[in-house]
Structure formats: structure tokens, C-alpha cells
Image (cartoon, rainbow, N blue to C red):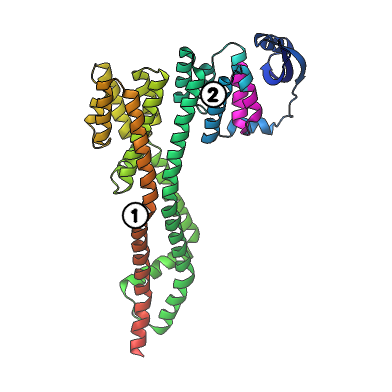
Amino acid sequence: MAQFSYTAEKTDGEQYQGVAQAADRFELYQIVRREGGHIVSVHEEGGHGWLDINALNARFSTVKEYDKVLFARNLGAMLSAGLSLARALAVLERQTTSVRLKAVVAEISNDVRKGETLHEGLAKYPNVFSNLMASMVKAGEEGGDLPQSLQLVADQMERMYNLKKKVKGALMYPSIILIAIVGIGVIMMVQVVPTLAQTFKEMGAQLPAMTRGIIAVSDFLIQHAISSVAIVASVITTFVVAGRTPQGSRAIEWVLLHLPVIGTLVKETNSARTARTLSSLLTSGVDVLTALDITGEVVQNSFFRDVIKDAKTQVQNGKPLSLAFENRVDLYPPFVSQMMAVGEETGATNDMLKRLAIYYEEEVDRSTKDLSTIIEPFLMLFIGGGVGFFAMAMISPIYQLSQNI
């Protein structure tokens, strides 16, 4: 397949530019003719030698979450303005700055020109576009309201992106403090402790156990620097690899759920994500069972995913959706099942789910703002305890020596 950039003219005389992939110019002319235009000028884009850096970037680079949000929102806006799907995709291809997304949009645009639907094109790239987006687009195409579905999925993706960003931002402050503490501790062990240890040795001081322990750690770090780095790297690698296994991931999720402050944040985040995803899918016209399948993929915590799988089974057996959530108040707060039950009784499930999503998104926003304030006293106690222990371990021998002089 070759890539062509071309200028075409519509029947009303309006000219536009586009990029398409085709086996040859004859196929390109057929593609443009199906769009309702005819070629004015065409240029076949050449290769880049044996090493095509752009092709490598397009293949191995990733697409940022917000680029996907902009893609969905802008595509919906252009379709609402009356542009054809192929024309809108061509415009987005030229506008996007992401190399990977540009290549994917070019492929989808080419498929659409050949008669495929948009959701079929999106489904070919699961690593770029989620099943959530493909399903909502499919529902919009089948229901004849694709622009509205794209706006809904853009709102959904943007809220999920903002939610994730807030949680990461709240955890960044304590993470930086802990990294700084570890760094300062290593510097003290390598630079300060050896000097004091030499002084104690020359003066023949009797050292308490905690002082001897600190000096032993300092000696090990200095004499076995490479081994120390290797041990730390091995421990980190072990945790990372174990965390990617189903058992390790579930263990980490269990720990997070049972931490005093983090556990509440995890429950609120997953409640917001569940409600928002279900609301968006059901509003777009996706059936309940498919919506639950997709929501299970969106919810990353396996404990919450189990609840959604159970909800699907109960719905298949004719039971209300709220029942599965009502039986797991240890994960989903009681307010979730109560609002779902009200929605089922009044026939306004979509609206209730949307209100649930807004409520818990606001709760997460408030919790993340308060998180730094809550964690700060514990960090201060931890830092104070570490400094106090180090001070007592290194100063008490000096005090004893001064008493003996």
C-alpha cells in the first residue's frame, strides 16, 4: 500500500485536501469518487530509506489519554457541523501532533473510505482506542446519532482522565517527601556516619547497640556499594514483577483497600468510574449486559470487577442490577445500591447513575485536596522519629565521652 496526499474538488466546487492509502492511483481515484469528489492533484509520498524513523515512532510510541479525548470531541464537533466522516478524519489526521495517533487515524480514514464503519476501524486498534469508545461509537452509528455519542464518550474519557490525574497529584507530595528522606538518609550513612565512627574508634568509646547498628549499615553501604545498589534494584524489580501477576496485583489491591485513608479514596474512585461508565453506555443505547462487560474492563481493581461480573450474572437471571451492589457494601458504599434501586423503580437508571458519578467525583476531588493535609502530620512524625533515632544513636556516645573527660 502506498500513501497519497491529494487535493480533490466536490460537486459544488469546494476544494479540500486529504491523505489516503491505496494500492495505486486507480484505487485512490475510486476512493475519492465514493466520497463525492474528484482528484485535482495527487502526490505519492516517498519512502525514507531502510530506516524510517517516523514509521518506528508511529509503531512503538504511545498515545496520551488527553489526545484521545480531543480526538473524540473534535470529531463529534465536526460531524455536528455537517462534515462527512471521511473529511473530518482527514482534518484530524493533519491536526494531531501525536505520531502514533496520526498513523492510526490515517488507517481508519482509509478504511472508512473503503466502506467500513467508524467503530470497526476503532476496534482494530484496541491498544489505542478502548472497547468503551468502540461500543459507544457503534451504538451511535446504529442509532443515527454518532456526533452525540462521540461527545458522550469524550466527556466520559475526560472525566476519567481528570479523576486519575487528581489521585496521582494527591499521592505525589508524600512520594516526593519519602524519596527525599531516603536520599538524605543514604547521604548521612555514607558521608556523616563514617566520620563519627572513626572519632568513636580513636577515643575508644563504648557504643550502644543502636549506634553499632547504624555504623554496621554505613560500613556495608560503603564497602559493598555495588551490592547495595543491586539488592535495592532486585527488591524493586521483584515487587514490580510480582505486582504484574494476578496474585501479586490482587494482593496490592487488597492492601490499598485496607489502608486507613487510601482505602476510602479507592472505593470512591471506583464507585465514580463504575457509575460514570454505566451511565454513558446506557445513555448511548448499549444494552445492559454489554455495558457491564465494558465497565468491568474500565474498572481496574479486581475486587470491584468481581462485583460487576456478579451483577451481570444476576441481571441475566432476571434480578435487579442494584442487588449485586447491595450485597457488597464493603466495596461499594450503600448509597450506590440505593440510588440504583431508586433509578430502577422510577425508570430513570441513567439519570441516577449520572448523579452518582457526579457525587463521587466531587467526593474524590475533596478527598484528594484533603489528602496532603491528612498525611502531612504522619510524615512529620515519621521524619521526627527517624531524626530523633539517628540523633540519639550518634549523640549519646559523644555525651558519654564528654562525661568521662
Give whichever of 5, 142 is nearer the camera: 142
Instruction: Give the image location of residue 390, x and y in percent.
Output: 37, 70
In this picture, residue 298 sits left or right of residue 101 = left
Q: Which residue is mark 2?
A: 76
Instruction: Give the image location of residue 34, x and y in percent.
Output: 65, 9
Is 21 included in the stretch rendered in magenta? no
Q: Which residue is mark 1?
A: 374
In this picture, residue 147 sits left or right of residue 30 = left
Q: Using the image, tell me which numbered label, if any, was put on residue 98.
A: none
Nearer-N-terminus badge (1/2):
2
Q: Is residue 231 above or below residue 5?
A: below
Instruction: Report the quarter where the N terminus lies.
Output: top right
Look at label 2 and name its amino acid: Gly
Residue closest to the far left = 327
Q: Is residue 122 above or below residue 250?
A: above
**Quarter-of-image position of residue 273:** top left
Label 2 secondary element: helix
Query: Residue at position x 48%, y 66% from top?
Result: 187
Query: Which stretch did the figure color magenta?
Result: 90-111
Disc 2 crowd rating (10 Å Cα; few below 14, some 14-19, many 20+) is: many
Q: CA distance from mark 1 to mark 2?
A: 42 Å
Instruction: Give the image location of residue 216, x and y in percent.
Output: 39, 68
Main SS, magenta region, reads helix
